[in-house]
Image (cartoon, helix red, strand yellow):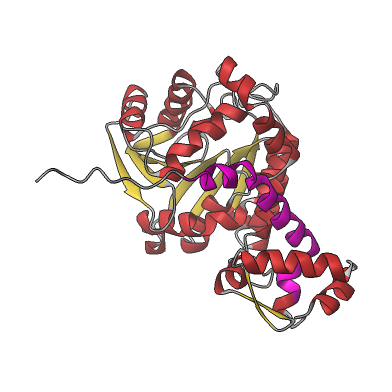
Amino acid sequence: MAASTHSCKPSPERIFNTMTAFQETEALKAAIELDIFTAIAEGVHTAELLAAKTGASERGMRILCDYFTSKEFLTKKGDQYALTQESATFLNRHSPACLATMVNFLASPWSRRNFAALAEAVRKGGTANGTGDHTKSHEEIWVNFARSMAPLTIPAAEFIAGLLRAEAGRPCRVLDIAAGHGMYGITVAKRNPNAQVVAVDWPAVLEVTKENARKFGVADRHTTRPGSAFEVAFGNGYDLALLTNIFHHFDVPTCEKLMRRVHAALQPGGKAITLEFVPNEDRVSPPHAAAFSLVMLAGTDAGDAYTFSQYEKMFGNAGFSKTTLHPIPDMPQQVLISEK
């Protein structure tokens, strides 16, 4: 018997949804700015009361809350709105897992400008907006990143600390390159009272790093070295080097240049810990890691989301003897551990 040739009728729904996806971004940005999820968590449940609390119009608040009910961020019974488990966990500012600040970077004017000029970036093969050389200081961008994106680090930072068995308390020196908010090195220091962390980043960014080191009680074991990761003197004799979300900003030769500097800074037997979006060799799966290449096309001169085989080759060329890959449960990124 011949195989069935039946196929589903094509639908424009996915195309329409993609064309209007910016509306969802702006709606969520507005709801976070008005802090409606936190207000509902505090017991303010009607459009009238939410409007009074936030200084908004009742009509506007009703329409926005109805929109988020249709999107399953809220529930509605009569005129009473309530949070779903998802929004209670990730959009209520009283929740330790709140991700609300991330919209300040992910939907920032810089990010939106990058994608507004995407056709030109495709023609050019790199960003069309003049800030794509990330070996140079663009401190306003990265201070915003450091202040906005720290909540996303918690699962990955805890996973890395676990992989390194930080809780064993072995004395170690940690080099945290492009530290940003600093939470990866800080998490290792929190878990290991005998860890000493040296953070490298641009001067204004390191002010955020230092704030977090004080906040989490590790400032006495946390120092900074301001400047470019390609130029500042790292020192040597480190047991660990953290390279979190940095390689995707650069082309292969630049990645190898940085990794050679890291290799020189580590003591024999030291390890470089890389956190990255690592697509499969087909470069189209898994979806989040594969799609990150487009973010780099829009925002950098030559960055990319590299496959594991590409990282193995780059890190081998930089002198590392072995690199292993460690998926983070329920996260789109992976950890690579490279041994000197």
Instruction: Residue 20 in the image: state x and y as whole percent.
Output: 65, 45
Residue 214: x and y in percent read: 67, 59
> Is residue 233 at least partly visible in the picture?
no
Name the residue located 52 percent from the left edge and 59 percent from the top edge: 154
In the image, which residues are magenta? Answer: 11-39
Q: Is residue 96 magenta?
A: no
Name the residue at the left extreme. Answer: 1
Whether residue 37 is in magenta: the answer is: yes
Magenta segment, prevailing SS (helix, strand or loop) = helix
For this rendering, which residue is in front, 37 or 79? 79
Q: Vertical placement of 42 versus 89: above or below?
A: below
Q: Quadrant of residue 275?
A: top left
Q: Looking at the rendering, in which quadrant would you find the C terminus?
A: top left
Number of dots carrying numbers: 0
Query: 14 above or below 211?
Result: above
Residue 328 lies, with reference to residue 90, above or below; the image says above
Compared across the picture, whether 24 is left or right of 52 comes to: left
Give the answer, above or below, for where 104 lies relative to 191: above
| Horizontal relation, residue 242 to residue 95: left or right | left
**Quadrant of res 3:** top left
Residue at point 31% right, 33% down? Answer: 281
Q: Residue furthest top?
A: 124
**Residue 253 image point, x, y percent:** 45, 18
Determine if residue 39 is in view: yes
In percent of width and height, residue 170 lies at: 39, 57
